[in-house]
Amino acid sequence: MSELVNVKIDGKPYQFEKGTTILKACKSIGIEIPTLCYLEGILEEGVCGVCVVEVKGSRTLQRSCITEVLEGMEIYTNSPLVRTARKINLELALAHHDVSCPTCVRNDNCELQTVSNKLGVKEVTFPQIESFYEKDLGGPVVRDPSKCIFCRRCVSVCENIQNVNALTVAKRGIKTYIGAPFDLKLVDSPCVNCGQCIMNCPTGALSERDDTEKVWEALSDPDKYVVVSTAPAIRASLGELFDLPPGTFVRGKVATALRLLGFKQIFDTNFTADLTIVEEAHELIERVKNNGVLPMTTSCCPGWIKYLEEYYPEFIPNVSTCKSPQQMMGAIIKSYFSEKTGIPKEKIFHVSIMPCTAKKYEAERLEINASQVKDVDVVLTTREIARMIKEAGIDFVNLEDSDYDLPLGEYTGAATIFGATGGVMEAALRTAYEMVTGETLESVDFIPLRGLEGIKVSDVDIDGVKIRVAVAHTLGNASKLLEKVKSGEEKVHFIEVMACPGGCIGGGGQPIPTTDEIRLKRIQALYKDDSERQLRKSHENPYIKKLYAEYLGEIGGEKAHHLLHTHYIPRSPWERAEKIELNK
């Protein structure tokens, strides 16, 4: 049994487990202490000083996030000294911050703004310190040093959760700098564009590149035929940006809103999630049968692919050659859809709506476009499409539901769970089982692959053959899994990796905040949709069957391989960095 200690907080007696921090103790009894830098289990170093409290007998105020309760401790959370110190510490942060709130992407959703209001800070009494550094606008993740308050959340997430280390703290004093090492732009660093730094930034210092104006221009161009496709995770998260509860299923409202914005065709990336599974399951079976490179890993997540190229290039032969559903959709739109409708592919402007910032990077990869034109013209995040809907004055909450356009709008339950960690693996197993056995898989739910556990490993019996599969989400967990595979400690046939916590439902382009509680509600919405679909296996999608019959030919055949498969390349960011340093 844990040892309890007796303390007083604001004059009232309480008991807490020994080792509990003051911050957690206060939270447990309903006392809210403001924080800016704190991220539980990730960053608990007392950087910002906004959470200070007074402890009787202490010579200085204590940072509640790192100070543990002790027997007989008397704590004051709202004394005049505490309130004054919190305001001073907050003003020091604001002195470094470009206070242009009305034009900031995080206006009304900014922790710095919220804490300032709660603490009653109406003005900054310290001189404003202009940033010494320019904005980093080169890639999908945009960094504005003038809005950085040096909380180090982004650095901690990038290092401790994602194991990427693309951000660091450099220099000292008023010239302190948080950005890529060697003064690199993020696009020239090992950044994988996952956007988890954005999700954890308390201000607008980090955000996605805003591509909405490109879409507005395309929609108003009479020479462009503008179509749109939406990712599986969007339907369970977009509603939050219109004050609907997390996990509200809004697929029908999304389709209606997109038509009102002026898109000519509304397609569902779930369709090509089904297509991905058919090709990927076939590829896995071929590798197992023909002693191919194993374990095979999924290739749907562009953050994972770039991480592997940067840090584990020896595993590139293990990656499925299948494109992601986004890029398969682009290839099919600019080939099959173009030919079927007679609309020249050069005239088609394809917008992809994703929960992900890395998808912006993926769409720009030269090796991933198959139609001799750009397969995906613009990628918008969940947040960007919400801004467009609001700009257009559309009452999203009260929209009637409508459906997506056929044939590229049909999907099975297997496709919709792509948005959750473990979903791609589960969908692939449903199809692989029936491809191998020729028998009907009666129970399609692979429960051991679900949930937010960082690494999940399970054995699956397919016609007497044991297939060992593994699922990891966050790149830190992916790294742990790969190290076990390299050492021989873990022997698996098939690996699914999603770069973001919880999978795409926790992607870098999703609504902020995204907590584990919110992730679980979004995941539940996707699995509910899966359970309610009449068809729950990708290869049963009638329009997928029609696509192969009319256009692609054999699964894994020459035409399918040309349009739907790609390759990946080793990258060495630190060699590039060293060359840049030498040339300065």
Image (cartoon, helix red, strand yellow):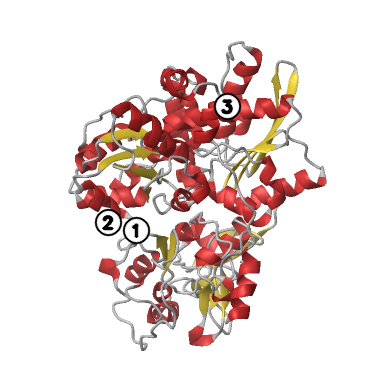
Residue 532, visible in the rendered structure = yes
For image coordinates 42% across by 29% down, the residue present is: 271
Give the left or right position of residue 565, taking residue 350 as reference.
right
Residue at disc 1, secondary structure:
loop
Q: Is residue 544 above or below residue 101?
A: above
Residue at disc 2, secondary structure:
helix
Q: Which residue is mark 1?
A: 210
Observer-nearest of 242 and 71: 242
Of mark 1 and mark 3, the one earlier in the sequence is 1
Residue at the outermost top position: 439
Q: Dot 2 surroundings within 10 Å: few (below 14), some, or many (20 or more)?
A: few
**Depth-wise, is mark 1 or mark 3 nearer the camera?**
3
Query: Where does the C terminus fall, quadrant-wise?
Result: bottom right
Give amino acid for label 1. Asp
Residue 520: percent from left, percent from top: 49, 40
For image coordinates 47% across by 53% down, the residue present is: 361
Of mark 3 and mark 2, the one earlier in the sequence is 2
Residue 474: percent from left, percent from top: 59, 49
Confirm or deny contact between disc 1 and disc 2 (CB under 8 A). Answer: yes
Confirm or deny contact between disc 3 and disc 2 (CB under 8 A). Answer: no
For image coordinates 72% across by 49% down, the residue present is: 314
